[in-house]
């Protein structure tokens, strides 16, 4: 792993078992961290739908989704998560911790009637976590109480320049060029709570770089829309600020996304989505941290548009999803899965010039071990503005 685990995953597991501190999901600590998907609140409410909406749609998954956007616009998604570890093992804290992030920000600019250019930011990996080991050691013949604190702060993101084009009246295509970037600081400190000795600390800073490309397509039928996207990337390079620390590289995964929506009545829409990510390409480089596997995601949802608020449409959404997580927690092929129920609603304002979408998720992560299991809640808010 990029972080200099001290001395590796076994000690990390011991640290997490001892006294996990309130700073992110436990799963952010394993291998390359916790994977994030740049899905807006509407897609989240429908179970995590990333592709397949019929009209112009802000998306950092399928670059063809913006085809047909009439005017320039911007979309921002804010996400807040809360986690409660399983806590069925002695010493595992059950304190609920929270975090907040911007998983997706995108701006788009129509050029003519068939072409839309876009730029955007997407979160990829979350590597922020903190844990503490409390112990006692002999120093100069005296038993002293110590606290060893392991802290990681940072993650990986990507910036995309994209283009969408209406190839024929019902078929859209798109392409995106991705720049992967980020930073990470790993640190370890030892404190002596009973005083008398100065604390000691050490840390290493890393910088990430990588390149990728995505292509996508969308077919818009009278009642059914089908879309697919392929994202490929080269190696992710992690360079340490300390020139004495050797740079590391990890193969970024090939990703396949497919989704569809179907209008089953005037006011009802059903949606389904599937994703495959080839993270096993990085398994050899992550072997000391437990390795990685290829993973899948499946989701489905229902959107009902028959309700209103103050004369404005108020679409209500429900969904369900199942997601495999790619990184093992130490040796023994211990991988986790997520299951979640989702829901939310949307509101169109200003005659379509602005839209707000809110979603909520409640689910569990289970890896067959209390150290890998937790309950989570996630709230996402997306705001979209069009230049009308």
Image: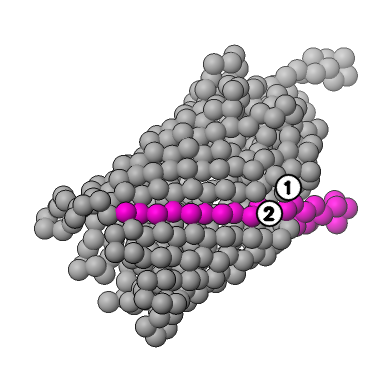
Secondary structure found at label 2: loop
199 lies left or right of 172: right
Helix, strand or loop for the magenta stretch, by majority: strand
- How was the colour assigned to the protein in this rendering? one colour
249 lies left or right of 220: right
- Residue at the spot of label 2: 252
Q: Is residue 284 magenta?
A: no
Q: Which residues, given as a range, are shown in magenta?
A: 237-262
- Residue at the spot of label 1: 282
Which is nearer the eye, 356 or 291?
Answer: 291
When the figure is inspected, residue 133 is found, relative to residue 201, above or below; the finding is: above
Specify the quadrant of the image occupied by residue 25.
top right
309 lies left or right of 226: left
- Kindly identify the residue that appears in the image at 48 percent across and 54 percent down: 258
When the figure is inspected, residue 223 is found, relative to residue 145, above or below; the finding is: below
Which is nearer the eye, 317 or 192?
Answer: 317
- Kindly identify the residue that appears in the image at 40 percent across and 54 percent down: 260
Question: Could you classify mark 1 by the number of other residues whose Cα lies within 10 Å: few (under 14), some (14-19), or many (20 or more)?
Answer: many
Quadrant the C terminus occupies: bottom left
Secondary structure found at label 1: helix
Are dots 2 and 1 in contact, CB under 8 Å?
Answer: yes
């Amino acid at each position: 792993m990029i972080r200099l685990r001290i001395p590796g995953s076994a000690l990390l597991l011991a640290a997490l078992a001892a006294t996990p501190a309130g700073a992110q999901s436990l799963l952010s600590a394993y291998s390359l961290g916790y994977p994030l998907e740049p899905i807006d609140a509407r897609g989240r409410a429908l179970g995590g739908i990333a592709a397949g909406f019929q009209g112009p749609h802000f998306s950092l998954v399928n670059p063809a989704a913006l085809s047909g956007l009439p005017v320039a616009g911007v979309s921002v998604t804010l996400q807040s998560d809360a986690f409660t570890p399983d806590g069925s093992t002695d010493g595992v804290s059950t304190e609920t911790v929270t975090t907040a992030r911007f998983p997706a920000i995108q701006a788009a600019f129509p050029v003519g009637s068939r072409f839309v250019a876009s730029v955007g930011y997407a979160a990829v990996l979350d590597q922020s976590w903190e844990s503490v080991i409390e112990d006692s050691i002999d120093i100069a013949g005296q038993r002293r109480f110590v606290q060893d604190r392991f802290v990681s702060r940072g993650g990986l993101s990507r910036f995309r320049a994209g283009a969408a084009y209406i190839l024929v009246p019902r078929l859209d295509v798109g392409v995106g060029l991705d720049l992967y970037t980020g930073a990470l600081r790993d640190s370890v400190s030892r404190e002596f709570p009973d005083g008398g000795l100065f604390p000691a600390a050490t840390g290493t800073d890393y910088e990430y770089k990588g390149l990728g490309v995505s292509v996508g397509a969308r077919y818009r039928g009278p009642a059914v829309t089908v879309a697919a996207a392929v994202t490929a990337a080269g190696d992710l390079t992690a360079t340490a600020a300390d020139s004495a620390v050797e740079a590391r590289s990890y193969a970024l995964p090939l990703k396949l996304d497919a989704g569809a929506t179907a209008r089953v009545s005037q006011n009802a829409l059903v949606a389904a989505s599937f994703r495959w990510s080839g993270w096993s390409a990085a398994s050899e480089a992550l072997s000391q941290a437990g390795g990685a596997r290829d993973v899948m995601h499946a989701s489905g949802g229902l959107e009902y548009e028959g309700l209103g608020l103050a004369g404005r449409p108020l679409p209500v959404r429900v969904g369900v999803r199942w997601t495999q997580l790619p990184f093992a927690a130490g040796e023994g092929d211990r991988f986790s899965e997520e299951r979640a129920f989702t829901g939310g609603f949307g509101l169109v304002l200003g005659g379509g010039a602005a839209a707000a979408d809110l979603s909520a998720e409640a689910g569990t992560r289970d890896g067959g071990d209390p150290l890998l299991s937790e309950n989570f809640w996630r709230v996402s808010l997306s705001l979209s503005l069009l230049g009308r």
